[in-house]
Structure formats: C-alpha cells, structure tokens
Image: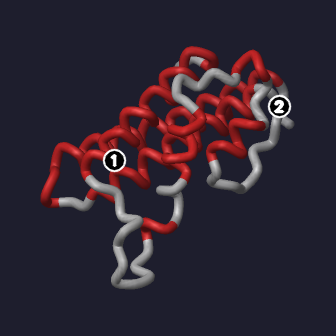
C-alpha cells in the first residue's frame, strides 16, 4: 500500500470521482423526463462505492473489485464504519450497480422509479459527506 501522503491523496482521488458521480446523478434527476431514473440510481451507487473505497484506502485496505456496498462496508474498521446511512440503504444502493444498465428482457420490474433514484442520490450524498468528513478535501 502507498506511503501515508500517497495514501491520503489516493483516498481523496476516490472522493473526487465520487463527487462527480453524485453531481451527474443530480443533473439527471433535474433533467427528469429527458433521462431515465436508472442512470441516476447507477451513478448514485457508483458514488457510494467510490466513497467507501476511499475510506478503505485511507486505512491501508486494498478495495476489492466488488460492487456490493454491504460487503465493502464490512471491511471498514469500526471507528470509521458510520457512513451516514443504514445497512438497508447500502443494500438498496447495491442493487443499482449492474442490472439496471443492461436490457436483459422485457420485464423491467427491477428498474428504479424516479422516487427510488432520488432516494439513492440522497443516500449517496450522505455517504460522500461522511467519507469527506474523515478524509478531507484537497
């Protein structure tokens, strides 16, 4: 794992990318009918994932190549495990990591509604704020 200064810089890079995902998800919500809610939900999940991975990097834990936020959260040391949302929220966000991006059939029951996408963005922003409070900004 990198030296402490490089480690902090890498954690902040994860947060920078997470901020971009939250910003993009917010724009999608604002555009409404011109877009689809799955795009906002996907970027919300990505933001949350990157914020949690930034916390892992901060503590010298190599983030695994997984998208499950509950599994990633389980790797966090107890003193930084409060990410601002419930485990249920982490699980809800996790479902937007993959499936919603692909057209796999005519059944679209897994597609998020606008209300679910908005909740996902709120949760992702809370996670990002919690991670930023621990890692700081550049």
Give yes or no for contact between labels 1 and 2 (Cβ–Cβ under 8 Å). no
Q: x, y (%) of residue 120?
A: 40, 42
Sequence-earlier tag: 1 or 2: 2
Residue 138, visible in the rendered structure:
no
Q: x, y (%) of residue 73?
A: 69, 36
Which residue is painted at 43% across and 66% down in the image? 100
The disc label shown at residue 60, or none: 2
Describe residue 31's horizontal placement relative to residue 70 as left or right: left
| Picture layout, residue 138 above or below residue 103 | above
Front position in the image: 9 or 70: 70
Which residue is painted at 69% across and 24% down in the image? 81
> The C terminus lies in which quarter of the figure?
top right
| Picture layout, residue 9 above or below residue 29 | above
Real-space Cα separation, disc 1 to disc 2, in angstroms? 33 Å
Residue 2, visible in the rendered structure:
yes
Q: x, y (%) of residue 24?
A: 33, 45
Residue placed under numbered mark 1 in the picture: 116
| Picture layout, residue 56 above or below residue 25 | above
């Amino acid at each position: 794992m990198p030296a402490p200064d490089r480690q902090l810089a890498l954690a902040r890079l994860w947060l920078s990318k997470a901020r971009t995902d939250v910003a993009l998800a917010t724009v999608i919500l604002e555009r409404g009918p011109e877009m689809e809610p799955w795009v906002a939900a996907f970027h919300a999940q990505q933001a949350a994932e990157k914020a949690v991975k930034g916390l892992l990097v901060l503590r010298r834990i190599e983030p695994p190549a997984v998208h499950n936020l509950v599994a990633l959260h389980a790797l966090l040391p107890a003193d930084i495990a409060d990410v601002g949302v419930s485990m249920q929220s982490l699980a809800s966000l996790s479902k937007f990591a993959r499936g919603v991006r692909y057209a796999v059939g005519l059944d679209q029951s897994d597609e998020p509604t606008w209300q679910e996408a908005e909740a996902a963005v709120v949760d992702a922003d809370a996670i990002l704020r919690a991670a930023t409070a621990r890692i700081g900004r550049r």
